[in-house]
Image: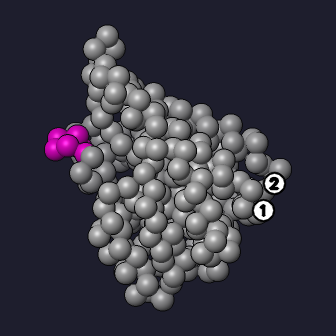
Amino acid sequence: MTTSLKNKVALVTGASRGIGAATALKLAQNGADIAISYANSRDKAEKVAESIRALGRKAITIHADAGVPEKMPALVEAVVKEFGKLDILVNNAGVFEAAGVIGAIDEKAFEHQLSVNVRSVFTTTQAAIKHLKPGARIINISSVLGERAIFAGASGYTTTKFAVAGMTRAWALDLAQQNITVNAIAPGPIATDMAPDGVEQMTAMKRKGTPEEIANVVAFIASDESSYITGALIPVDGGTNA
């Protein structure tokens, strides 16, 4: 199987670390040029870009805070201005804030999660559509909590990831006749700073996944080999939702 992305341009949001960084690097290893957005970690984003350039691919970093969704269209325009096109959009930027149980939810945290996890995905994708041509890929990073509510106290985050799953399926229908696929990856517990110790016990495999294990699936979905997959919520969760 080949996952060649030669001559493709990918935008990966929130790619200064974790799943986003691993995804940006994997797509570059497969031949794509990469635009990396970041909210706070400029130095980390630049290190990822340097690793991509070392592979002989082009890479740029752009500051774009997904917590301010109305600014995300400018990110898309900056990418297209630099590269002349956009082929792959990976909506990865996200936050997890437990926020509390219903009746005692921190409304500020709830609204912040809605802005980053839902509204920015919408505004970024809405802006990208006019630049995407047949064969383009939209890949949203959801969560196992976008399929079922696994534990109490995280309904705010769960709500946002259910929304991502819903947008993915609806947009797949919207864009199918343009031959643009829309899919979501649903990671389980991954070894990043968002996953606390012990959470691996929720998985069948009793371990956290790695960012690279998510990136491998993203790279396949970004490739031509995934051409008949759209509207899917693909679990990469070590059996958490088995």
Magenta residues: mostly which secondary structure? loop
The Cα atoms of the two marked residues, 1 and 2, are separated by 6 Å
**Image height check: is 21 above or below 199?**
below
Q: Residue at x 30, y 22 (%)?
A: 106
Res. 173 image quadrant: top right
Which contiguous range is marked in magenta?
A: 195-200
Q: Mark 2 — residue?
A: 178
Residue furthest to the right in view is 177
Residue 226's spot in the image, x, y percent? 65, 61
Q: Position of residue 156 (x, y in %)?
A: 38, 27
Which three-letter amino acid code belongs to the residue tagged 1? Pro
Question: Could you say whether the residue bearing mark 1 is in a helix, strand or loop?
Answer: loop
Would you say 1 lies left or right of 171 here?
Answer: left
On screen, residue 146 versus residue 132, left or right, reads left
Q: Which residue lies under the disc numbered 1?
A: 134
Q: Say which element carries label 2.
A: helix
Residue 70 location (% of width, % of height): 55, 44
Residue type at mark 2: give it: Gln
- Earlier in the chain: of badge 1 and badge 2, it is 1
Q: In which quadrant is the C terminus drawn? A: top left
